[in-house]
Image (spheres, rainbow, N blue to C red):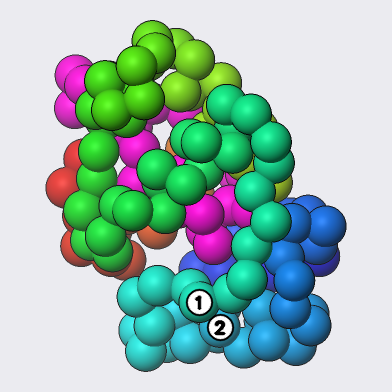
Amino acid sequence: MRLSVLGSTLDLDERFVDAPPETVREQVTEYERGERRAFDLPLAFPDGFTGRVMRAMCEIPYGETRTYGDLATALGTAPVAVGGACGRNPLPLVVPCHRVVASDGGLGGYSAADGVACKRRLLDFEGARA
């Protein structure tokens, strides 16, 4: 499913959302209007490590960030492994991988839409520091 948000086009893998496309689009529109800070869609996380990282990302509140190292420590793994899982996130925005940043204050990567420029717009929109 293709969605437009803040001038970027995001691709969400519908296999991981158990909700009608209209519901997903409605929640994304509410987010973009500043009316929604969290998505309450029924999600199907992949098995294994990527699913664990996705669950951890869902715990990062709107307007806040965590480093790849923070998540790695919580999950008992290496930051580079967390970065790889973030890059495989099939539900960008809904599972907020844009809120995971580098420990040196940089943004790190972003595999969705137009990359780091999109990540910067999302974080700025949420008022998050990075």
Q: Residue 39 colored magenta?
A: no
Residue at (37, 89) in percent of width and height: 35
Q: Are marks 1 and 2 in contact (CB under 8 Å)?
A: yes
Where the N terminus falls, by quadrant? bottom right
- Residue at mark 2: 27
Please name the amino acid that badge 1 sits on. Asp
Please name the amino acid that badge 2 sits on. Gln
Residue 7 vs residue 104, the one in the foreground: 104
Q: Is residue 122 left or right of residue 106?
A: right
Give the residues in magenta.
Answer: 91-115
Check disc 2 and report its element: helix, strand or loop. Answer: helix
Residue 33: quadrant of the picture: bottom left
Residue at (72, 65) in percent of width and height: 17
Q: Could you say which disc has been placed on residue 40 in the image?
A: 1
Residue at (74, 78) in percent of width and height: 19
The prevailing secondary structure element of the residues shown in magenta is loop
- Judge the density around disc 2: few (<14), some (14-19), many (≥20) Cα neighbours within 10 Å: many
